[in-house]
Image (tube, rainbow, N blue to C red):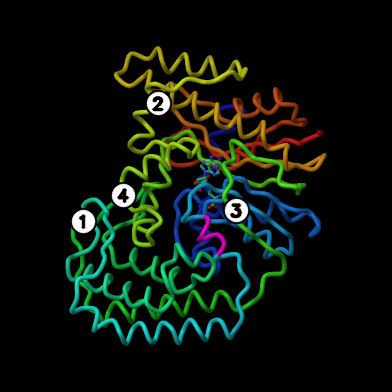
Amino acid sequence: MLDVERSAVRQRSDLTFKHNKSLGRHGWLRLTPAYSVKLVKEIIAGAPTDVSILDPFSGTATTTLTAAEHGNVAVSFDINPFLIWLGNVKCRSYTAEYARQVKDGVAAAISRTPTFLTQENWRPPLFNIERWWSSTTLEVLSAFRTALVEQFGEPVENREDGLAWVAFCRLVIETSSAAFNHVSMSFSAETAHYEVEHVTNLYSVILESVLASCGSPLMGQGEVVEVDARTIPDMGRRFGLVVTSPPYPNRISYIRELRPYMYWMKFLEEAREAGEMDWKAIGGTWGIATSRLTTWGPNGHVLPNILTETVGRIASTDTKNAQLLATYVLKYFYDMHLHLSSLPNVLERGAQLHYIVGNSTFFGNVVDTPAILGESMRMLGYDDVGSKIIRKRNSNKALFEYDVTARWGG
Ligand SMILES: C[S@@+](CC[C@H](N)C(=O)[O-])C[C@H]1O[C@@H](n2cnc3c(N)ncnc32)[C@H](O)[C@@H]1O
């Protein structure tokens, strides 16, 4: 695309997570790198309802839920246990009777909370927790959590039955000092003090809105399963359409973004685990995931020439972390190459692929994600590979989001 045409591309917040906020279940919890329901709807609009849809990078299950709402059967993969849990809670059909039971259970938990305030309750071992909540708020949240556990069990043990816990996740964020004004989370300078009544009233309002969004049954079906997208096995089923947004090569860590939820819900119990989880994540970059890069090297795959050239340019920059970040980029695309080489295990012949991805820059060197992924796809035997720009990402003139498309001819 010519530069003059690029300059006409707009940011389009309707094609980001911001669009999802008022869309029922899609707006339950916010994950900044989630993509827009509108984008997914446009892609699947023409697909017949008997096409099975796959999202190998589920995140908040936007694809799978949108597809199930459209009447399709959809499956998504992720490796993050919290996101797998959340996706499955989002994609379930709920009855009015179930909603009544949740409300009754919550009413019982709320009435018991003051008794728990007199004891020591479990708190998440989140680093610098006092930056997130004042000590008063923390005491109340912990007591209320103990009451919810008595009523519903720990979310990690009861992985499907989670509406009360989704509302709790929203509560912990809304009572915290975290703000989501940017791509990543930031903190306001002060933490507010919330007393027990304020917390339980706020929770009740959140729960009402969560339950209200479960009123109508889904026309199709959606499920999130734990699969590492780099090594997709033959699962005995195949998909005709892939709509997904993998991580971008931009050093955003999903574990880091999700840590308040993951700790409060006990999907993460210590910092070391976070680094291990991020090492499995494509583009993962937190803690040990970065230090391991210093000894990592690709293992026996012929990789796109344009990747080798890009990595060489980054490595030869006269900057302190040039080699480390060159390896980061190499590992990101190596992992995506592994993903694309195992994906045909679950594809129908003629399956159509849509990968929503962003480019990035390292020390002024552009990493042309659609070109590198496109070359991987061609090398691996995909047909009709192409891409188009769908939006500008922010005020940086070089950063765009693309829809990279291809077809699996088999
Ligand atoms: C950009 S997010 C997807 C956002 C999603 N489209 C949404 O709307 O919420 C990328 C997801 O890929 C997941 N992921 C990273 N590495 C993975 C791997 N090796 N296998 C499966 N999922 C992975 C991350 O945990 C994250 O949830």
Q: CA distance from mark 1 to mark 3?
A: 34 Å
Q: Position of residue 333 (x, y in %)?
A: 54, 28
Q: CA distance from mark 2 to mark 1?
A: 30 Å
Q: Residue at x 71, y 26 (%)?
A: 380
Q: Amino acid at mark 1?
A: Arg
The amino acid type found where label 4 is placed reads Glu
Q: Quadrant of residue 319?
A: top left
Work out how far the residue at label 3 is from the one at label 4, CA to CA, in angstroms. Answer: 24 Å
Residue 377 in which image quadrant: top right
User: Marks 2 and 3: CB-CB under 8 Å?
Assistant: no
Q: Position of residue 72 (x, y in %)?
A: 74, 60
Identify the element where label 3 is drawn: strand
Q: Which residue position is annotated with label 2? A: 293
Q: Residue at x 51, y 18 (%)?
A: 310
- Which mark sits nearer the N-terminus, 3 or 4? 3
Distance (Cα) linking label 4 and label 2 = 21 Å
On the rendered structure, is 202 left or right of 95? left
- x%, y% of residue 217? 66, 74
Dot 3 corresponds to which residue? 225
Image position of 203 (left or right of 96): left
Mark 4 lies on residue: 270
Badge 3 density bin: few <14, some 14–19, many ≥20, Cα 10 Å: some
Question: The magenta stretch spans which residues?
Answer: 84-88
Quarter of the rendering occupied by the N terminus: top right
